[in-house]
Image (tube, rainbow, N blue to C red):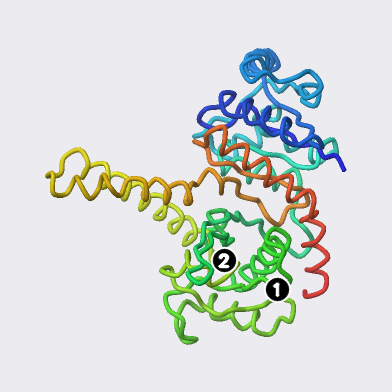
Amino acid sequence: MGYKISIDAMGGDHGLNTTIPAALEAVKKDSNLQIVLVGDHHKVKRALDRYSKLKKIKLPTLQRIAIHHASETVEMDESPSVAVRKKKDSSMRVAVNLVKDGSVNACVSAGNTGALMAISKFVLKTIHGVDRPAIVYALPAYNRETKKLSKTYMLDLGANVVCSSEQLFQFAIMGSILAASSKGIAEPRVSLLNIGEEEMKGLDNIKNAAKLLQSCDFINYNGYIEGKYIFDDSTDVIVCDGFVGNVSLKTMEGTLRLIESLIKKTVVEGSWLMKIPTIMALPLFKKMKKGMNLDSFNGASLLGLTGIVIKSHGSASANAFETAIYEAVKEIKYNIPKTIQESLEKVL
């Protein structure tokens, strides 16, 4: 079965230098994939010609990439309201419009997160039964027993700063469906992020959400989870409000950078007694970094919309953006919006 994805070619910190090579690699590896690059036609065509020659892309593969002109670009620091009201021909807006009118099956953008959420919600609307869409991201998780790296889905990661218990309940259902499809498991474990595992701990909205989840046969509720266990593969879905989720995600990113900086500092500035064991351990650090390579986890889904929209990290490399494209493909194959709607109709 073929599928088609629109890409906001101008979005992100690196724009065409990321989106074009990623698109070329994706269509080269997946013969069922077609891509529509949305942006300034002249600039996109020039970049496409250059990168297709560098990568030696053959004509039959190149023919599965089309260009759709858009005269405007949403800047990374632009307000969502301006993006929605004044930039109706932006590459981001047009890419989402193509999902709305059925021209493509999904959209991928590395652009302004707030603008993408606002545009997507305005154009596509939310699924019946969903109050607000949520941003969900797959985090690396390590199983100490099997010694294998897995994924844990976490939502919301910034779309909704304050959430009611009912909204957290909706997030749990959506996250469970995504995890079941992506990880191939019948009953994904769902946990609420909290300051402790005891039932009496936490804010009222979290405790009330726990009661809703406990009474829902559809959800395999796993109780509360503390922040220190996020990477332990002790659950498949972690639910929280957007404020807590966003702070948690950025703390994780900062911690990884700190560890990397400390290792480099020891190698460059440390005494020989410190340098020797650090240098000897470098292969291990490199292997660990490869296993925790965030490029292979790029691609956050805007869950709860009637169409599929994937948000790539703004500073993503071409490899990372390619991963976001594959996340869109995965959601197309499992028809995530339809599955969410059918499930919500059963439990709400």
CA gap between label 1 and label 2 equals 25 Å
Question: Residue 257, how many percent across, how many down?
Answer: 35, 46
For the point 77% across and 62% down, the residue is 340
Q: What amino acid is at disc 2?
A: Cys
- Relative vertical location of residue 57 with respect to residue 202 in this rendering, above or below: above
- Relative vertical location of residue 13 with respect to residue 323 in this rendering, above or below: above
Question: Residue 120, how many percent across, how many down?
Answer: 69, 44
Q: Residues within 10 Å of mark 1 (few under 14, many from 20)?
A: some
Local secondary structure at mark 2: loop
- Relative vertical location of residue 109 with respect to residue 290 in this rendering, above or below: above
Q: Is residue 43 left or right of residue 148?
A: right
Q: Is residue 310 left or right of residue 146?
A: right
Read off the residue under disc 1. Answer: 187
- On-image quarter of the N terminus: top right
Question: Residue 119, how many percent across, how many down?
Answer: 67, 41
For the point 39% across and 55% down, the residue is 251
Local secondary structure at mark 1: loop
- On-image quarter of the C terminus: bottom right
Q: Is residue 4 left or right of residue 172?
A: right
Question: Residue 174, how many percent across, how many down?
Answer: 69, 63
For the point 64% across and 65% down, the residue is 171
Label 1 vs 2, first from the N-terminus: 2
Q: Which mark is residue 163?
A: 2
Q: Nearer the viewer, residue 17 or 201?
A: 17
Q: What amino acid is at disc 1?
A: Glu
Q: Nearer the viewer, residue 273 or 43?
A: 273
Q: Which mark is residue 337?
A: none
Q: Looking at the image, is mark 1 or mark 2 nearer the viewer?
A: 1
